[in-house]
Structure formats: structure tokens, C-alpha cells
């Protein structure tokens, strides 16, 4: 089963997440999708995606936030060009550490909300005028209906500057 949740903080580059249904004996495959809804190319597009786990309470909204770790130089993807009306997908997986798959006990804790998965990061890019922009996003799993949802924090966009900040 694939689940889709969209974060549209920035009209030009909405971000959405898709994932497999969590299963024992498997890692959780997911994709972070960045869509250029504009009429011009987005250049030098880079993303940095992180994940974290926290404990939760069954049937409750997340009470404990993860320690949001800043991206380092090695965390960023290589620059990409996204054409107008096109999507770029950064695929990956979440595991319990070191490539170890989830076991049934962990899946049970995840499905009733006692373990939460946080997927967060930043996308940065240049517009057709060479102005640098960024979008910060955060998704959490599970929400009350065992789906991905938007976090209550760590979501935002750059404030457009006049004149804009030019790419180096």
C-alpha cells in the first residue's frame, strides 16, 4: 500500500511523501517527491532528508519532538534540474538501524502510536533568475489513522528578499 501526503508551503515546489505499509521482516521503503509546479526550470535542486524515532502514546498526537539534526555537507544530494510540471523523487528506506528490518513487536508499537517515525529535511534550489530558495518539511508516522501526517513544527519556506539572494 502506498500512502501520499503533500506539504504545499511553497507554490513552486510542493513536497510529498509516499511509503510502503510497515511490515515485519522488512525495511520501510519511501520516497520524498519534489514537484516543480512552476512554468520555468528549478536548477541546482538539492535535498537533505533525515529520519528519527520517538516514543508516543496510543491514539494521541505526538508529544515528544525529535532532536532535529542539521544537515551536513555530505547529507545533501547532488544538484538536479527539475523541468516545469515535473517531479523528482529521492527514494530511500527507514530501518531500525544498520539496515535491520522491523520485527513484529516494533510494527505493533508503530501501528498503535507508541513509536513514531519522523521524516524531515530541507530542499534548496535556484529559480530562473538565479535566486536561492529553500523549503523545510516534516512528516510523522503514524497519525491517528495510521498514516503519515504533517508535523506541527519544522515546516517553512524562505522569505523572498528584494533583491534576491543569488546562487554562488
Image (tube, rainbow, N blue to C red):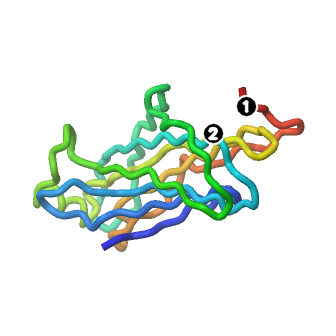
Q: Is residue 133 left or right of residue 25?
A: right
Residue nearest the observer in this picture, 18 or 46: 46
Tag shown at residue 167: 1
Q: Quadrant of residue 113?
A: bottom left
The answer to whether residue 49 is left or right of residue 54 is right
The answer to which of marks 1 and 2 sits earlier in the sequence is: 2
Quarter placement of the C terminus:
top right
Which corner quadrant of the image does residue 104 belong to?
bottom left
The residue depicted at 83 percent of the width and 37 percent of the height is 164
Secondary structure of residue under mark 2: strand
Front residue of 38/124: it is 38
Q: Is residue 145 above or below residue 128?
A: below
Label 1 element class:
loop
Viewed as shown, does residue 112 lie left or right of 43? left
Q: Residue at x 20, y 59 (%)?
A: 109
Quarter the N terminus occupies: bottom left
Percent position (x, y) of residue 60? 36, 64
Amino acid at each position: 500500500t502506498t500512502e501520499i501526503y503533500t506539504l504545499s508551503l511553497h507554490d513552486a515546489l510542493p513536497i510529498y511523501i509516499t511509503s510502503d505499509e510497515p511490515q515485519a521482516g522488512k525495511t520501510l521503503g519511501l520516497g520524498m517527491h519534489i514537484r516543480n509546479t512552476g512554468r520555468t526550470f528549478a536548477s541546482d535542486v538539492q535535498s537533505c532528508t533525515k529520519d528519527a524515532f520517538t516514543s508516543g502514546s496510543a491514539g494521541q498526537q505526538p508529544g515528544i519532538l525529535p532532536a532535529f539534526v542539521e544537515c551536513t555537507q555530505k547529507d545533501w544530494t547532488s544538484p538536479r534540474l527539475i523541468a516545469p510540471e515535473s517531479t523528482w523523487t529521492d527514494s530511500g528506506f527507514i530501518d531500525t538501524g544498520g539496515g535491520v528490518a522491523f520485527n513484529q513487536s516494533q510494527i505493533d508499537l508503530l501501528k498503535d502510536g507508541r513509536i513514531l517515525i519522523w521524516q524531515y529535511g530541507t530542499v534548496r534550489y535556484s529559480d530562473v533568475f538565479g535566486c536561492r530558495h529553500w523549503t523545510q518539511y516534516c512528516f510523522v508516522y503514524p497519525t491517528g489513522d495510521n498514516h503519515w501526517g504533517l508535523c506541527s513544527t519544522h515546516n517553512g519556506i524562505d522569505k523572498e528578499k528584494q533583491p534576491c539572494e543569488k546562487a554562488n
